[in-house]
Image: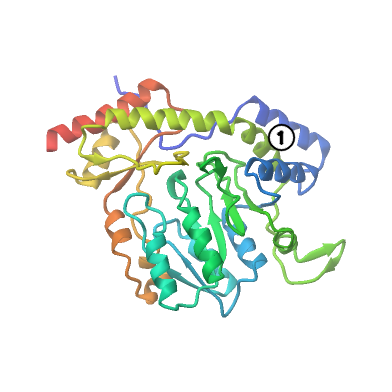
Amino acid sequence: MTDKHISIAAPQLGDEEFERVKAVMESGIIADGPEVRGFEREFADYCEADYGVATSNGTTALHAALHALGIGPGDRVLTTPFTFIATANSVALTGAEVDFVDIDPQTYNLDPDALEARLKAGEQVDAVIVVHLYGLPADMGRFVELAETYDFALIEDAAQAHGATINGQPVGSFGDAACFSFYPTKNMTTGEGGMITTNDPDVAERAARFIDHGRVTGYEHSEVGHNFRMTSIAAAIGRAQLKRLPVFTTVRQANAKLLTELLEDAPVTTPYVPEGTEHVFHQYTVQCDQVERDALKSYLDSQNIDTGVYYPKPVHHQEPYKHLNVSAPVAEEVSKRVLSLPVHPGLDGDDVKRIGRSVARYAEVVT
């Protein structure tokens, strides 16, 4: 008998999501409207931010946030090369220049020391996008200090970090703006969708205008904008998901804790969580120390266990950015060694034990 398939992600949709969508459909207001405004308020409150602006996806959230902060042609934005390409693409879409700073080998997040060295060298930096990769908050204390000292806009790419905290303060409340994604594989979903959170009313207003054709009111438009709006159907799903997010997070953290215990003696490096931070485990990512990553991945595939490599090629090696000739040796090395194991809330204890024991069993054979 073949063991059941364990997926790398599984959106958790239930009765409340269906009922909320049904109510929106029955109302006839299925595009942008009161449901979206409600989701914006609730998500901003969850992040302890003053304002929320809902968008069509995480990439449009980043693009709109950069625009709202005045980033455009002639500006220069630094970010991590170890992220999904949307982080960099959002900068390029504004007409600004993007460049990359290497990562910390333990957290996989942007290295504040490496950034500080670039700033001290006098590089032009108009904004920095910090990514909370895999659900682990970056060192926002350092980044906020650097932003204040060197006067650049600070943006959190929190696409993978809904509910993560630093000393109790939620991500999404540290930077000049923060951006979330609600893609189906994320910790909560709206199908497709994004959100900007900010404490600056001007940033919120400019972002809201930009995502709605530059609209001021009615058919008055003050600038060239986009149609990046969220639908009421997506917002209805999001409001239900937001209520369930604390439970999703608790299950992810429990699954991660059990995986770490099971892998204690395996030749892999389990996720590092700095003191004071709450990791929400969008991904449970190990580094392969004494086993070859792709071979381990193939073995787990044979055991009907999905895994993921996030990300096999750093952004600075992707075709649109090769010309920058970036040196990021840590990101380049880590990209060859990381492997993400299933950790989502659709797993039960037996699933998690099977994953951990399968990794350990393979490691015993080959080491």
Residue 119 visible somewhere in the drawing: yes
- Up the image or down, 130 lies above or below 127; here it is above
Residue 186, how many percent across, how many down?
52, 42
Q: Regarding mark 1 in the picture, which secondary structure is present there? A: helix
For this view, does 239 lie left or right of residue 126?
right
At 42% from the left and 23% from the top, the residue drawn is 348
Mark 1 highlights which residue?
Answer: 21
Between 115 and 214, the one nearer to me in the picture = 115
Asked whether residue 304 is in view, the answer is no
The quadrant in which the C terminus is found is top left
**Left or right placement of residue 299 versus residue 150 in this view:** left
Residue at (65%, 25%) from the top-left corner?
Answer: 15
Residue 173 x, y percent position in the rendering: 60, 50
Residue 224 location (% of width, % of height): 73, 71
Q: Above or below — where is 70 with respect to 173? A: below
Pick the quarter of the image with the N terminus. top left
Label 1 is placed on what type of residue?
Answer: Val
